[in-house]
Amino acid sequence: MLDEVINKLVSHQDLSHEEAFISFKEILKEEAKSDDIAAFLLNLQAKGFTPDEFAGCAQALKDEITPIKSLRQGIINISTLSISPTVSFNVDLATSFVVAGCGIPVLSNYQNPFHTKSKDVETLNALDIHLSLDPKQSERCINDIGIAFIDLKKFLKTHEKFENTLFNLKTETIFDLLSVIVSPASTKYFLIGATDSDNQETITKAFKSMNIKRAMIVKGEDNLDAITISDRTKISEYSKNDVSTYFISGEDFGIKTANRADLVGGSPQENAEIIKNILSNRGGDKINLVLLNAAAALMICDAAKDWKDGIKKAEQSIKHGRALSKFKNLQNWTRNIKKINES
């Protein structure tokens, strides 16, 4: 069947949900040929995936990962689909700590593709948060601390041939996007940053068949892979089995428009300092940027009634030190795990 599917993709014919599901299952098998893996991924990328194709591949990947049994309800994934560094700091990471400080469990997939460096990985390392957690340790982390950052590849029983093929492709494929969206926990809520408008709406439509309750995929018109405050933000939202796309501005909710230059980051070490300053209630416009993203996350989880309520609760998470406490608890927890792993 895989040969037939690849021929369809070469001809730019769309696959059904079932065809995508079965084909992705096939390329994850030990006996899959490297040429077939590459042909499927590259031709799907060249054609552009549909909502059905994305959802089918996501289901196949979900079936192949080690699950996490979380004791916490209402987990949200706050991540970005962007692999390459943007001029901003890691808004998704800072937002994750603020939301966790509001009592919402956060289990975020960080981008860590086979073929290139990840901006989130480099910044998390600069924050002294160790990322060597295996599935069981990640499960303990989310249950003990209420926040964890995971690399989905460590939950996937991929064979060496599959990993080598992805490494040698040296380009983004649907796997990189799936590795952000597919969760080892029963995650029902998502706030995902994007830099590609086409993928933004396509993936949101795919959520309709992915057992998700509510999600937003957001893209700043200044090309920020988050909700921005220097321009409008395009939001594609999935809620109550319906998809809608709309635009917001920070000024709609009392946040003044910032200069794009005031939102920029720098090296992983500089971004780490920016995040620590925000969590310590220092950072000017960058704090407002994180507050608006955190408000969206809280609304998605039904922990805030509207944007202004979400902003207020996010402010309290920072001002009362709860966001910073979550960061320090995670930092210390992963340090201890690192010592155990190295002993």
Image: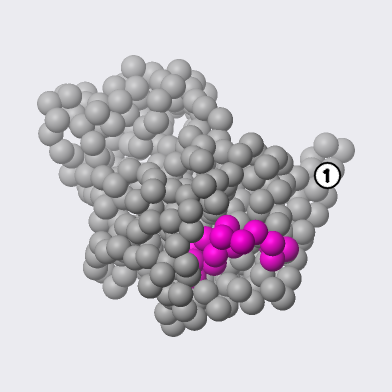
Please tell me which residue lies in front, 212 or 116.
116
Q: Is residue 175 magenta?
A: no
Q: Main secondary structure of the magenta part?
A: helix
Residue lying at the far right of the rendered structure = 343
Circle 1 residue: 340
At x 12%, y 26%, the residue is 11
In the figure, 27 relative to 316: above or below? above
Q: Is residue 216 left or right of residue 119?
A: left
Amino acid type, label 1: Ile
**Position of residue 235 measured from the top left corner of the image (x, y, whole percent):** 33, 60
Q: In what quadrant of the picture does the N terminus appear?
A: top left
**Position of residue 2 measured from the top left corner of the image (x, y, whole percent):** 24, 28
Q: Is residue 227 visible?
A: yes
Please tell me which residue lies in front, 8 or 288.
288
**Position of residue 4 measured from the top left corner of the image (x, y, whole percent):** 17, 27
In the figure, 33 relative to 283: above or below? above
Q: In what quadrant of the picture does the C terminus appear?
A: top right
- Please identify the quarter of the rendering in which residue 206 is found: bottom left
Element at label 1? helix
Q: Is residue 198 left or right of residue 195?
A: left
Q: Is residue 326 visible?
A: no
In the image, the segment drawn in magenta is: 279-295
How many marks the image carries: the answer is 1
At x 47%, y 78%, the residue is 308
- Please identify the quarter of the rendering in which residue 342 is found: top right
At x 31%, y 50%, the residue is 200
Please tell me which residue lies in front, 31 or 289.
289
**Position of residue 99 measured from the top left corner of the image (x, y, whole percent):** 58, 67
